[in-house]
Amino acid sequence: MNSVSLIGRLVRDPELRYAQTGTAMCRFTVAVDRRMSKQRRQEAQANNQPTADFISCTAFGATAELIANYHRKGSQIGIEGRIQTGSYEKEGRTIYTTDVVVNNLTFIGSSQGGGQAQGGFNQNQGGFNNQNNFQSQGGFSQPGGGNQGPVNSAYENDFSKNDNDDDGFFPVDNDDIPF
């Protein structure tokens, strides 16, 4: 079984691109806190050890557009998906990548900094089922809060790993970390 569930905050604004076929692709990185006691966390921070993991994620289709339109750096998000590995050649070296391909997402809350990502979609009739014709199977209210339901994506990766940023990873700067 290949199943991943994460809750975290976006490290930077999501990057939305479109394939030649017109399919939307959104790449983003989620910072997920490691479970540890308060004492262990303080020790790790004092020794400049990481207390969070930075997970590269990719979403497709309408799900990608929802993430790009309603989430910003610092937004809290819940995702479910699967691990996908890949590789590509760069300057004669093989670069290996690991991403979470998003199948479902949940709008959890707003960004800590009070940015533009304050909202979600109310689930009226079974949520959003992403079909190739981009028509929803359920209704949505306007962004702004309330019960926030999951969003599903039925797209597979039709993008080459060569479309990744230089080495397949996003550089993480201390200014990019939302906490």
Image (spheres, rainbow, N blue to C red):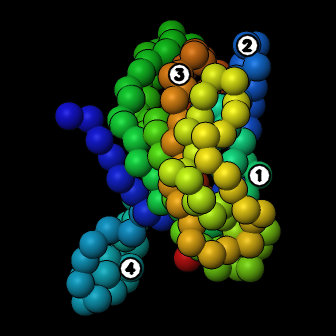
Looking at marks 1 and 4 on the same chain, the residue that comes earlier in the sequence is marked by 4
Q: Pointer 2 and pointer 1: residues touching (CB < 8 Å)?
A: no
Q: Is residue 1 at least partly visible in the picture?
A: yes
Front residue (pair 38, 71):
71
Cα–Cα gap, marks 1 and 4: 33 Å
Q: Nearer the viewer, mark 1 or mark 4?
A: 1
Q: Which residue is drawn at 40% across and 34% down?
A: 98
Looking at marks 2 and 4 on the same chain, the residue that comes earlier in the sequence is marked by 2
Q: Is residue 56 at least partly visible in the picture?
A: no
Image quadrant holding the C terminus, namely bottom right
Cα–Cα gap, marks 3 and 2: 12 Å
Looking at marks 3 and 2 on the same chain, the residue that comes earlier in the sequence is marked by 2
Looking at marks 1 and 3 on the same chain, the residue that comes earlier in the sequence is marked by 1
Q: At which x and y percent is residue 34?
A: 32, 68
Query: Mark 4 belongs to which amino acid?
Result: Gln
Q: Pointer 3 and pointer 2: residues touching (CB < 8 Å)?
A: no
Q: Nearer the viewer, mark 2 or mark 4?
A: 2
Name the residue at the top extreme: 92
Q: Mark on residue 69?
A: 1
Find disc 2 in the rendering and name its residue.
Answer: 21
Query: Mark 3 belongs to which amino acid?
Result: Asn
Q: At which x and y percent is residue 2?
A: 26, 35
